Amino acid sequence: MPLRNRETEAHKMVAIQGETVELRIPYDPKYIIVARLVAGGVGARAGLNIDDIDELKVAVSEACTNAIEHAANDTGTGPGPAVIVLRFTPRDDELQVEVEDYGAGFDLDQIKQPALNEPSIEGGLGLFLIHQLTDEVDIQSAPGSGTKVIMTKRRTR
């Protein structure tokens, strides 16, 4: 029996569509490390290199930190459970990560967009980093509906 080419075998694994890994963590900073570990593992599965994975782990950490800081106190008014839900969906040469909280949400028009050339240490640095470290970012929120941050990280060549 001939030996299989590892690169070809790995590409077959990455090409599988529709696999989503879901993780639920409490609003507690000590669980961010779990989110980082899962991001690293699924990122490797999606074919991201070490640098891509490191950047993704920081972006995931920032999104979770924002949820903990801004939604944890609102869980009594939010539409769902008192957890942060992360969904990792690998696709060909990229990984999409959703970080969703069930806090009170906010009006997106009221959020101050970070200046990309002058991030503020008073707030917005997390969003600045998420935008800098991922290839696409979509933030979905409205008062009473929680918040979802959808990040896509593509494999660099």
Image: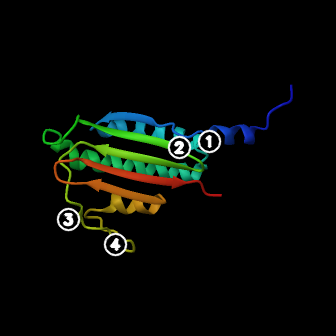
* Residue occupied by mark 2: 90
Callout 4: 10 Å neighbours few (<14), some, many (20+)?
few
Residue extending farthest to the top is 1
- In the rendered structure, which disc, 4 or 3, sits on the residue that comes first in sequence? 3
* Residue occupied by mark 1: 14
Amino acid beneath label 1: Val
- In the rendered structure, which disc, 1 or 2, sits on the residue that comes first in sequence? 1
Residue at x 27%, y 49% (from the top left corner):
147
Q: CA distance from mark 4 to mark 1?
A: 36 Å
Residue at x 61%, y 57% (from the top left corner):
156
Nearer to me, 12 or 69 = 12
- In the rendered structure, which disc, 4 or 1, sits on the residue that comes first in sequence? 1
* Residue occupied by mark 3: 110
- In the rendered structure, which disc, 3 or 2, sits on the residue that comes first in sequence? 2
Q: CA distance from mark 2 to mark 4?
A: 30 Å
Q: CA distance from mark 4 to mark 3?
A: 15 Å
